[in-house]
Image (cartoon, helix red, strand yellow):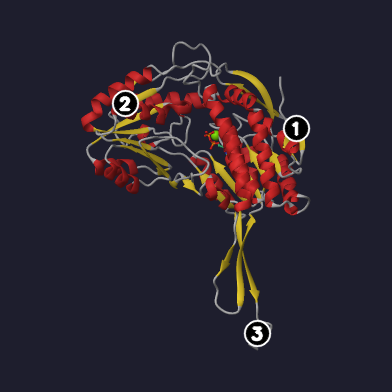
Amino acid sequence: MIRYRMLIDGQRTEAVGGGWFPVYDPSTEEIIAEAPKAGPADVDRAAKAARAAFDSGAWPQTTAQERGRLLFRLAEKIRNESAHLAELETRNTGKPIVEAEFDIADTATCFEYYGGLATKVLGHVNPVPDNALSLSLREPVGVAGQIIPWNYPLLMAAWKLAPALAAGCTCVLKPAEQTPLTALEMAGYFEEVGFPAGVVNIITGFGEEAGAPMVTHPAIDKIAFTGSAAVGKNILRNAAESIKRVTLELGGKSPNIFFADADFEAAVDGALFGVFINQGEVCSAGSRILVERPIYSKFIEALAEKSKAIRLGAPLDRETKMGPLVSKEQYERVREYQEIGKQEARLISGGGRPSSFAKGYYVEPTVFADVDNSTRIAREEVFGPVAAVIPFEGESEAIRIANDTPYGLAAAVWSRDIFRALRVVKSVRAGIVWVNHMQPTYVEAPWGGYKQSGFGRELGPWGIEEYLETKQVHINLNEQPIGWY
Ligand code: ADP
Ligand code: MG
């Protein structure tokens, strides 16, 4: 059994309690490795190492140029290891290898982008009156505690680590317990490319034992979290005690809106891509497919036919378009939503477990039609390949249904009418709105939620902002005493 070790203060380490937990290949249900089962004592070690690395030692003296170069080297290392990392990611998550290859390429690009941005963090001269010079300096927020989900394991690690390191923070990162392997593999790169010990710490374990203690640890200044809304609320509450900075990227129930004048082929294709990519385990999944009445019947017919043709298979097979779900727990959750949907709406494709697999957490891509927006499959995040198709009549009804959700992460609109498409863009309350597309994400552009999808923005210059404090400096240019008393 391969045992991966954590990274604390530059050392590859086991958990203080000596525990390990199994890591699975969800396509075979077999254990493929073990990872250390960290608890509060490990969080304490990691947080203190990150604190010491932030407060003293080499890191606070490191220039922005040097931090940039370290990130470039890390990006290069990841590119060199990309075949290996993609395979490991696929084995641990079940996602098709072709998708994992994109993820690893995006991971390298993310480190590279923030390597470049490290030297472009600018302060200000504030135009104050009086004989004074007023400056705003940007400084790192301190120790960042970063808790990430299992759907894009290494890419989510990069979205968290890259801007924090560029800003000059130190980090304690906790991958999801289902998918710790690529982050633990990457843990070996930091020393090799030249990061000082303690700047990046990676601990593995479960939410209650290893995540929650990060949220309350006094040495940690900020928590960045991506995951479920329920855990996000819990983190926000627990972070209050020590007034930690918090950024949250939570779930979604994103509308993908199709007007009758959209290119029909592109629309059906975009509906499938929006909801089924990565097995639907995507926070911005277009899981509510809103279709205008004149094309509704034809649209659901085409959707049903095309989703039945999606090729499920072994994740490492390059022909595979959909792999298993990440875990037994997630499989059971999605199976339950398939059953709930059958009570609430009309099943038009999928709805169960594919019969061709003896093992693995596979579910059929599932489409429900005639869904009412008040039902559970229209309101609750499934995080799997389950689509709810909702008919609408005209622009204002589309906007009303699109916004009738507690979430606001993403939306998309498909139409050839530029005026209408842009009116929808302005009216939908979401952190991203795609026009005639859904899902592409770029490191140069902001990412984050409205409403209960969270707050704070990742990626682009917005991403580094979340790891910076602003210090005002007032320099008196008058040599005389104040003379007040
Ligand atoms: P899912 O429901 O898909 O498992 P979660 O939101 O539970 O998504 O998990 C996302 C991340 O949050 C994981 O790294 C998990 O270990 C962590 N986590 C879960 N519960 C807590 C908690 N109470 N405090 C901090 N982190 C947690
Ligand atoms: Mg969980």
Residue hosting label 3: 482
Label 2 amino acid?
Glu
Q: Nearer the viewer, mark 2 or mark 3?
A: 2
In this rendering, is residue 119 above or below 384? below
How far apart marks 2 and 1 lie (CA) works out to 53 Å
**Which type of secondary structure does the marked residue at label 2 adopt?**
helix
Label 3 amino acid?
Ile
Q: Residue at x 66, y 29 (%)?
A: 80
Report the quarter where the N terminus lies: top right
**Which type of secondary structure does the marked residue at label 3 adopt?**
loop
Residue 463's x, y, as percent? Answer: 55, 48
Q: Residue at x 57, y 79 (%)?
A: 130
**Residue 370, quarter of the rendered image:** top left
Mark 2–mark 3 CB contact (< 8 Å): no
Residue hosting label 1: 14
Label 1 amino acid?
Glu
**Which type of secondary structure does the marked residue at label 1 adopt?**
loop
* Res. 193 in view: yes
Give the mark, 2 or 1, whose residue is nearer the N terminus: 1
Pick the front one: 97 or 3 = 97
Q: Residue at x 75, y 38 (%)?
A: 191
Q: Nearer the viewer, mark 2 or mark 1?
A: 2
Q: Nearer the viewer, mark 3 or mark 1?
A: 3
Residue hosting label 2: 265
Q: Ligand 1 lies in which image quarter?
A: top right
Left or right relative to 483: residue 103: left
- Circle 1 residues within 10 Å: few <14, some 14–19, many ≥20: many
Give the mark, 3 or 1, whose residue is nearer the N terminus: 1
